[in-house]
Image (cartoon, helix red, strand yellow):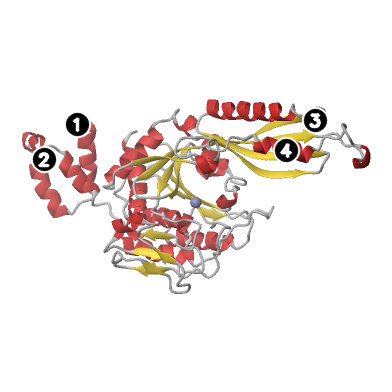
């Protein structure tokens, strides 16, 4: 009750003076409000932290019009210069809010600080992070966002390509947005909600902090990264300069979802050596490495253990590339699991299948090389459970129920977690990402921004 009373006192600070007086008289009689319970008051006050869906929609539409597609074939940082167009706009807007400790670097990263406004010392510095780039899978040039302000619940035919139809049967989550606003693209491009909805939520929360000094928080860092979609989002990040202890990426789906777990990921390469002899005189001597490679692939299980046969918490092994000539061949795999023990079992099993197959071709030899790619962020987040717990609480304070999810892939958050900033992933509302049917609900984006505000408040309250 002690901490609830503290929270109530805080809420008290930001309410209308008249209402404050009435409540003050009620609060003078502890027996009365103890009888009623303070919780209903508190949840009422939390609802006063509101971000306008329309204002975040405007902001979001401004960002998605800027082409920021990244390029997996480029070795430059950022992989495409045009990503900096959005970085520059974000920087300008941060300055415009009065956040003067903001900078953009030559790699396209934007760093900014909202100073602490709390008397408390030792509040951990937390970071909110989103990526500016969009996926290479689908065009991001000339995005024309369309706001369907009072969505009527019907399928939506996108005007620039009528074959692109957003169907309620394919996207049942649309039903949660009837009579609210949703934003789609126009049919020829992706929308870019991944992850400009995250950028918009962070910027809107930043503006809220600036305009509401009664909301107490510690030092907050803002980070926008390039090249997340091509796996380079943390390649040039300066963690020293960022100086945050804990982080949150805003890069998730349905309202209320919180992802604190990713795959642990390895690559595996099998090198196969054949025996090469002039084909005219090769009888009983030649061993063709390509055929051995084919046999290894054939020996893999058909109905399990692959991306196409697994879901939820199941891991898999997935051949991605075969290269070779008769003399030697290589097969590249990706290996995925949520646990390190599971990952090791996949390696052991794959290696055994390969060795047994190669043994059927006398003279052929093989090597098996495993390479670490990224690790499940949960291994790190379990060492500081408050990071995800505060996000859960913040989501609830924003009036949503929490959906804990595991990502069957990696995020920037998994990399951040292993370079010193434990970092779960919070929803923004984005749907059908990387496609022309991408869309986002504007109330979800507003709720994401509110969640950011609550996260910062909770960190301050708990010191
Ligand atoms: Zn993303």
Q: Earlier in the sequence, mark 3 or mark 4?
A: 4
Q: Can you name the residue that lies furthest to the bottom here? A: 160
Considering only vertical position in the picture, is 135 above or below 65? Answer: above
The residue wearing badge 3 is 364
* Observer able to see residue 243: no
- Return the mark for residue 293: 4
Where is mark 1, residue-wise? 1
The quadrant of the picture occupied by the C terminus is top left
How far apart, in angstroms, are the residues tagged by discs 1 and 2? 14 Å
Give residue 267's position: percent from left, percent from top.
64, 37
Within 10 Å of the Cα at label 2, are there few (<14), some (14-19), or many (20+) other Cα atoms? Answer: some
Name the mark nearer the viewer: 1 or 2: 1
Quick one: 61 or 359, which is closer to the camera? 359
Q: Quadrant of the N terminus?
A: top left
Residue found at x 74% / y 30%: 358
**450, 104: nearer the viewer:** 450
How many residues crowd around disc 3 within 10 Å: few (fewer than 14), some, or many (20 or more)? Answer: many
Asked if residue 205 lies left or right of residue 265, the reply is: left
- Residue 437 on image: x %, y %: 45, 62
Front position among marks 4 and 2? 4
Q: CA distance from mark 4 to mark 1?
A: 66 Å
Locate residue 409 relative to residue 116 in the image: left or right: right
- 3D distance between C-alphas at marks 3 and 4: 11 Å
Residue under numbered circle 2: 27
Give me the disc on residue 190: none
Q: Nearer the viewer, mark 3 or mark 2?
A: 3
Q: Secondary structure at mark 4?
A: helix
Asked whether residue 181 appears in the rendered view, the answer is yes
């Amino acid at each position: 009750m002690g901490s609830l009373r503290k929270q109530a006192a805080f809420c008290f600070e930001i309410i209308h003076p008249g209402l404050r007086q009435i409540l003050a008289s009620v609060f003078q009689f502890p027996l009365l409000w103890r009888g009623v319970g303070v919780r209903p008051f508190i949840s009422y006050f939390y609802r006063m932290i509101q971000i306008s869906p329309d204002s975040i929609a405007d902001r979001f539409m401004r960002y998605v019009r800027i082409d920021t597609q990244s390029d997996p074939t480029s070795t430059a940082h950022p992989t495409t210069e045009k990503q900096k167009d959005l970085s520059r706009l974000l920087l300008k807007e941060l300055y415009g809010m009065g956040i003067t400790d903001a900078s953009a670097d030559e790699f396209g990263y934007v760093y900014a600080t909202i100073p602490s406004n709390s008397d408390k010392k030792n509040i951990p510095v937390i970071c909110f992070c989103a990526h500016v780039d969009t996926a290479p899978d689908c065009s991001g040039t000339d995005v024309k966002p369309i706001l369907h302000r009072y969505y009527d619940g019907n399928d939506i035919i996108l005007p620039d390509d009528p074959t692109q139809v957003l169907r309620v049967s394919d996207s049942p989550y649309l039903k949660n947005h009837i009579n609210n606003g949703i934003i789609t693209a126009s049919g020829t491009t992706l929308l870019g909600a991944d992850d400009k909805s995250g950028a918009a939520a962070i910027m809107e929360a930043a503006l809220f902090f600036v305009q509401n000094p009664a909301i107490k928080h510690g030092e907050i860092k803002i980070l926008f990264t390039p090249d997340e979609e091509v796996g380079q989002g943390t390649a040039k990040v300066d963690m020293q300069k960022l100086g945050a202890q804990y982080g949150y990426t805003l890069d998730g789906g349905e309202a209320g979802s919180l992802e604190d777990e990713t795959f642990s990921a390895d690559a595996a390469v099998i090198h196969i050596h054949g025996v090469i002899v002039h084909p005219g005189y090769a009888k009983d001597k030649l061993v063709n490495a390509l055929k051995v490679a084919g046999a290894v692939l054939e020996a893999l299980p058909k109905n399990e253990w692959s991306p196409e046969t697994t879901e939820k918490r199941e891991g898999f092994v997935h051949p991605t590339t075969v290269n070779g000539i008769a003399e030697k061949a290589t097969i590249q795999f990706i290996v995925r699991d949520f646990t390190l023990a599971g990952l090791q079992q996949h390696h052991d099993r794959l290696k055994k299948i390969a060795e047994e197959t190669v043994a059927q071709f006398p003279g052929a030899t093989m090597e098996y090389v495993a390479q670490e790619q990224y690790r499940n962020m949960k291994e790190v987040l379990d060492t500081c459970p408050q990071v995800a717990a505060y996000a859960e609480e913040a989501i609830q304070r924003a009036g949503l129920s929490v959906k804990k999810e595991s990502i069957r892939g990696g995020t920037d958050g998994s990399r951040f977690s292993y370079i010193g900033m434990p970092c779960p992933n919070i929803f923004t509302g984005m749907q059908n990402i990387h496609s022309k049917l991408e869309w986002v609900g504007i109330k979800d984006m507003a709720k994401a921004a509110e969640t950011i505000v609550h996260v910062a408040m909770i960190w301050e309250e708990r010191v």
